[in-house]
Image (spheres, helix red, strand yellow):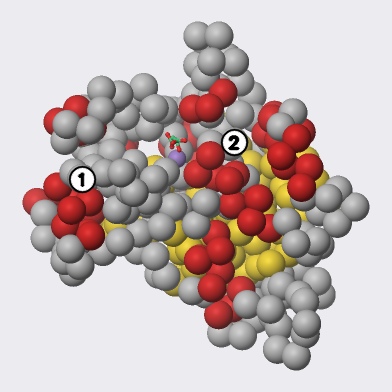
Amino acid sequence: MRIVVLGSAAGGGFPQWNCGCFNCRRARSGDPEARPRTQSSLAVSAVSDRDCGPGWYLLNASPDIRQQIEQTPALHPPEGRLRGSPIAGVILTNADVDHIAGLLSLRERQPISLIATYAVHRILCQNPVFSVLDPSVVSRRTLPLNEPVILEAGGAEALSVTAFPVPGKVALWMEDAAGGDLQAREGDIVGLEIAGGTTGARFFYIPGCAAMTAELADRLQGAALVFFDGTAWSDDEMKTAGVGEKTAARMGHMSMSGPAGSIAAFAGLEVRRKIFIHVNNTNPALIASSPERRFAHENGWEIAEDGQEVML
Ligand code: MLT
Ligand code: MN
Ligand code: ZN
């Protein structure tokens, strides 16, 4: 299995267009300690060699998808074809703007499948702009919860995906419609377990998670690789950075640090490789030489970088 980090930042990217915080200014100045990042997404293929042809699946469709595809040669149209793409489908973890806006950039009548829970498909169906993905070309496939689904790969080896519920809240742009009850309902937000390939490898993609439950800890125990919600270092960092009042918890994200944070939550779990992804531009761990980055490293965590590849 071959995994490419298409983007590693949270919504807004790094630097964020309207942000003059300490981190964003460093990134804009070209400081190598503060490498820019596009909004979070992975590409995954069952086959692990360099030139693996069709059968790539994108995990979420970020607003930066066009740039991400251009920067990843394996996702370019096949040699000698006027139109075509090795991208077989997109799998969504929720309906946040940073996970669905890129769908609108995939409207050029390329047959792909759009795979999401019933709840997320329902949100997309209620918003007519997404009908730009012509249903006669783009098939919509419903992801059940806790049940593996085989992903077709155009003759190449197949992957399977299992979606499972994680704690979280409704999408930011749906908050008003939710009438004050921000608690996610079944299928609003999921993590993904992807398995398959010649090695039978498995990994987890969880870019948004509000808390570590006993059930989630059990599921992740013994995993070879987990990409996990790295939005915030501390719950009040937006406030400390002077860019907003919202806490990470209010946004549906657990923080990296602190007794209820993700570093502590994973400390008792056996997970071979742990990579933070969906990192917000205010997170001090984005700075390569920061004490926060060092602390994360010392606890066995990497901070994902755009273009990073993992073979499993
Ligand atoms: C989040 O991860 O909290 C959302 O992406 C926020 C947003 O949509 O801007
Ligand atoms: Mn997000
Ligand atoms: Zn910023």
Percent of width and height locating residue 162: 65, 46
Q: Is residue 172 above or below residue 74?
A: above
The amino acid on which the numbered mark 2 sits, given as a three-letter code, is Ala
Q: Residues within 10 Å of mark 1 (few under 14, many from 20)?
A: some
Question: Which of the 4 quarters of the picture holds residue 137?
Answer: bottom right
Q: Residue at x 35, y 59 (%)?
A: 37
Percent of width and height locating residue 249: 34, 25
**Is the shortest distance between ligand 3 and the CB of mark 1 under 8 Å?**
yes
- The residue under label 2 is 95
Percent of width and height locating residue 206: 48, 44
Q: Residues within 10 Å of mark 2 (few under 14, many from 20)?
A: many
Q: Quadrant of the N terminus?
A: bottom right
The amino acid on which the numbered mark 1 sits, given as a three-letter code, is Gly
Q: Residue at x 86, y 48 (%)?
A: 135
Percent of width and height locating residue 266: 32, 42
Which is more N-terminal, label 2 or label 1? 1
Res 99 seen here? yes
- Give SS at disc 2: loop
Res 211 seen here? no
Q: Residue at x 34, y 49 (%)?
A: 17
In the image, which is nearer the foreground, mark 1 or mark 2? 1
Q: State left or right for residue 104 relative to residue 285.
A: right
For marks 1 and 2, give the CA distance. 27 Å
Q: State left or right for residue 108 relative to residue 233.
A: right
- Give SS at disc 1: loop
Q: Residue at x 55, y 80 (%)?
A: 73
- The residue under label 1 is 20
